[in-house]
Amino acid sequence: MDILQKIFDNKPEIKEQYNYLYSYYKNSFERKEKDKDQINRVSFVSEIRFGYYLHNRFENLEYDPNVSGKTPDWVVDSNFEKIIFEVKQLNPNNNIFEERINQVKADKYYGEGKLKGVYGIGDIFPYLTKIMEKEKIYRDLILDGRYKLVICINFSNLLDEFFTDNDLIDYLDLKNNYNFFRHTIEYLDINNFNNFCNNVSGFLVIPRFGSDIFFIENKMSANKLSSETIEKLNKTFLISK
């Protein structure tokens, strides 16, 4: 069985989100469905979840458009600002993740075993550089003032790191953690990190425990979102259009 269909069977709320969005983004969704890579299809689920969140908050939302030869996941034109919402799903290494996908498809996945008991800010180090890759892709569009960037990160598929909503608020506080990250992460590219801190307006995140999707503003950004946009991103209860 296809993993996307299996997820829809196990999580009907995601199937409902997909069905709701399909009428708005039919052509783009059909292009995505031609990709049969099972890991990519799990990533498509993250795009659906973030897209549903955004669609209920913004008009003029586009999915997978061509922007100067790049194809960001979601783009909003709102309050005289254009915003790229690029999705990053964090997974275990491919071998482990493919095995988990096969277990889910065979109804043999029963959740994680015993997790380690203590977590700290150092646990996000290996993932920080992966998240930074998204800024690098769109850096030219940000620096010339055409777009702002929000990175949408799904942490829920990780194997060991049990990041909660409060953890992510602490760990993705780039302003307060800037010096610590620079001096502690030995393999951090300082130029890329500085661009990341300056250019990313904020993060939409899905933790492993706590809130579903919520927004974290990057207080260090030189490309801050308007107060109206931040208010929409922080809204909790909205009725679908």
Image (spheres, rainbow, N blue to C red):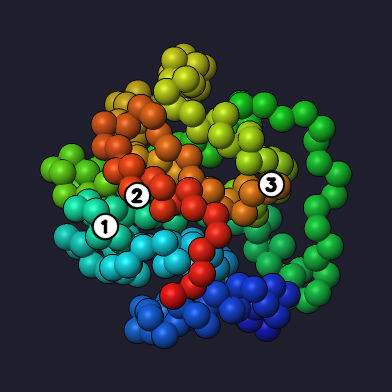
Q: Quadrant of the C terminus?
A: bottom left
Q: Is residue 236 above or below residue 166?
A: below
Q: Residue at x 82, y 32 (%)?
A: 117
Q: Are marks 2 and 1 in contact (CB under 8 Å)?
A: yes
Amino acid marked by disc 1: Ser
Amino acid marked by disc 2: Thr
Sequence order check, earlier mark of 2 and 3:
3
Q: Which mark is residue 99?
A: none
Q: Quadrant of residue 222?
A: top left
Q: Secondary structure at mark 2?
A: helix
Sequence order check, earlier mark of 2 and 1:
1
Which residue is denoted by mark 1 in the rendering?
78
Amino acid marked by disc 3: Gly
10 Å neighbourhood of mark 3: few (<14), some, or many (≥20)? few
Q: Residue at x 40, y 41 (%)?
A: 202
Distance between the alpha carbons at the discs numbered 2 and 3? 23 Å
Q: Is residue 98 above or below residue 197?
A: below
Which residue is denoted by mark 3 in the rendering?
210
* Residue 153 image position (x, y, % from top left): 50, 49
